[in-house]
Amino acid sequence: MTDTMNTNELRIAVIGSGPAGVYSSDILLKQLAKRSEELGLPSTARIDLFEKLPVPFGLVRYGVAPDHPSIKFIAGALEKTLDNPNIHLYCDVEFGKDVTIDELLERYDAVLFATGAVKDKPLNLPGADLDGVYGAAKFVEWYDGYPTGAREWPLEAENVAVIGGGNVAMDVARELMRNADDLKAKTDIPDNVYEGIQKNKAKVLHLFIRRGVAQAKFSVQELREMEKLPGVQLIINEDDFDLDDETIEVAGKDKLARQMVEELFTVREMAEDMEDDGDVDYEGNPADRKYYLHFNSAPTEILGEDGKVKAIRVEKTETSADGKMTRLGEFEDYPVEAVYHAIGYKPATAPGIAYDEKGAHLANANGDGRITTEADGGEVRPRLYATGWAKRGPVGLIGSTKSDALMIVNHMLEDFAAAPERGLFAADRNPESIDELLASKGIRPIDFAGWKKIDAFERAEGAKEGREHKKVIEPDQMRALALD
């Protein structure tokens, strides 16, 4: 991890190697090349990406269901960006533990936080502490082979509920209805996940969404993946699709909402055909699992017996064209033995950085990405920035992450240009300084070449089974592959 001494290049530390961190690195280099002369800044930069896990890509590798067809494309694009001599990858280095904010500011002109989310928002319902209630985050960690995640998952429940109206809820529901052999053939799941899903006893799944069809937050792609589950019959409530003229008009004004509603009506037709053809799946084969899609349904309580889940109580709601939800006081109990909640993530905190609990993100000035001393107001802390979920909270998709990155990068460059030092703030400009610091602490980072060794091994293991890829999940094995 050495390069020639260049005291006039910008030095940027990025915390997090998921989409937010990698996109920001790429955009910074491009914007610097484009705007350096205009702003009077150096035309080159060294960007060091610090990742607490032994491997890069964050959300793309560990936060999205393995059967998303877009994953391979996104991961490939991120990897191409990392294969850049101006970007240096430092995996297995945890901010706040292995390296501090002061140590970074001594060596870098700016620090950009692009950390993701690892915890669920709490489910504030009576019965949320019963045995059999699970947050989506831990389940996602399990089926994605997160290095420090669970290696086994209890899948004994025959009747399951999933709470949530976003993409994560759809992912969780789909994986709970998945056929293990089908999933293995098409994805990189490790053996323990395949064996776990093989034993999954779930036969009936209820997905509860508080608002109406026109207010659903999941993507069209999620719906299309739901439509093609082997052995699964989709079941809907006809009344949920009885939309008034105003709701249809409002949805029609937004392209994404219109596409999503149109796809949901396709789901309704499929569900009707599945029932008419004798309870079959999308290919007309007998279905042995049933997937109920409930809109305008707000869970109010999880009912238990002997400390375990036995049912979920749901209140009927009504949603106006402007998205306002009204509770109707009509309740129904559904017998289930497990409840998964996917009602949002809480992005990670960062040691030494103020956190906005209400917005669930690092404190930054009016959402512009400049880190502040306090969540509510406060002063801007020079040379510290946030992007992605660390900046705005757990909302938005890849497109939002890219637009965030462009905005933050331009703020950084403009701040650099406005300072007398022209961006060159760090006293220590030795490019080997960070390597020497980590070595003095006994820390051996995994660089891009080390990641490529892990990736090559995963591809070779997958090829043995006729698969493109097969994940390594144990951190020590990753380190051995990368460093030995």
Image (cartoon, helix red, strand yellow):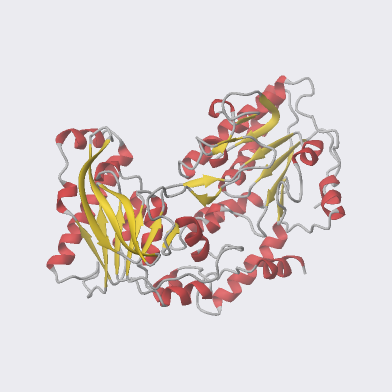
Q: Is residue 13 above or below residue 188?
A: above
Figure disc tally: 0
Q: Is residue 452 left or right of residue 325?
A: right
Q: Is residue 73 above or below residue 3?
A: below
Quarter assignment of residue 24: top right
Image position, residue 145 (x, y; %) = 55, 65
Q: Is residue 315 left or right of residue 172?
A: left
Of 313 and 225, nearer the camera is 313
Residue ranking furthest to the left: 276
Q: Is residue 336 above or below residue 344?
A: below
Of 200 and 46, nearer the camera is 200
Image position, residue 131 (x, y; %) = 43, 64
Q: Is residue 476 left or right of residue 465?
A: right
Q: Is residue 37 visible?
A: no
Which quarter of the figure is the C terminus placed in? bottom right
Q: Is residue 329 visible?
A: yes
Residue at x 56% of width, y 56% of height: 76
Residue at x 79% of width, y 59% of height: 444
Residue ranking furthest to the front: 306
Residue ranking furthest to the bottom: 464
Residue at x 86% of width, y 50% of height: 436
